[in-house]
Amino acid sequence: MTPEQFKSARRALGYSQKALAAEWGMGNNAGRTVRRWEALERPLSPIAAYAMQLMLDAANIERVENV
């Protein structure tokens, strides 16, 4: 999953960066981490990409478009 696909998936699931970080229990400033993943400032965590795919599967969303 690319950072662009990650961002599209997050939006398709209806999460803001901060809300996704809170859903995953990442801590108070973790919305910044999500922003950095999406902006290519930090490598996207493979675990986060996998978790996002699981969320897409659970929501029955097959494909997300790039931003």
Image (tube, grey):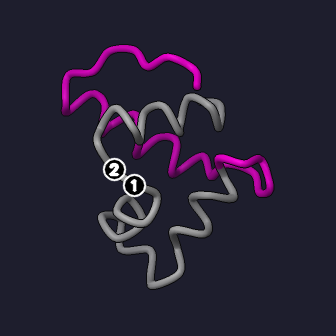
Would you name the residue on which mark 2 appears? 15
Would you name the residue on which mark 1 appears? 16
Q: Residue at x 39, y 38 (%)?
A: 11
Q: Quadrant of the N terminus?
A: top right
Q: Amino acid at mark 1?
A: Ser
Which element type, helix, strand or loop, lies under badge 1? loop
Give how far apart the Cα atoms at labels 2 and 1 are: 4 Å
Q: Residue furthest bottom?
A: 28
Q: Residue at x 40, y 34 (%)?
A: 53
Which mark, residue 2?
A: none
What are the residue bounds of the magenta stretch?
38-67
Judge whether 26 appears above or below 45 on screen.
below
Q: Residue at x 41, y 41 (%)?
A: 10
Q: Are marks 2 and 1 in contact (CB under 8 Å)?
A: yes
Local packing at callout 2 (Cα closer than 10 Å; few below 14, some 14-19, many 20+) is: some
Q: Is residue 6 left or right of residue 3?
A: left
Counting from the top left corner in percent of width and height, residue 62 is at 32, 15
Q: Toward the viewer: 29 or 48? A: 29
Judge whether 45 appears above or below 29 on screen.
above
Q: Is residue 50 magenta?
A: yes
Q: Is residue 52 left or right of residue 67?
A: left
Q: Quadrant of residue 3?
A: top right
Q: Quadrant of residue 21?
A: bottom left
Q: Is residue 58 left or right of residue 43?
A: left
Q: Quadrant of residue 67?
A: top right
Counting from the top left corner in percent of width and height, residue 59 is at 19, 31
Q: Residue at x 45, y 85 (%)?
A: 28
Q: Toward the viewer: 52 or 66? A: 66
Which element type, helix, strand or loop, lies under badge 2? loop
Local packing at callout 1 (Cα closer than 10 Å; few below 14, some 14-19, many 20+) is: some
Q: Amino acid at mark 2?
A: Tyr
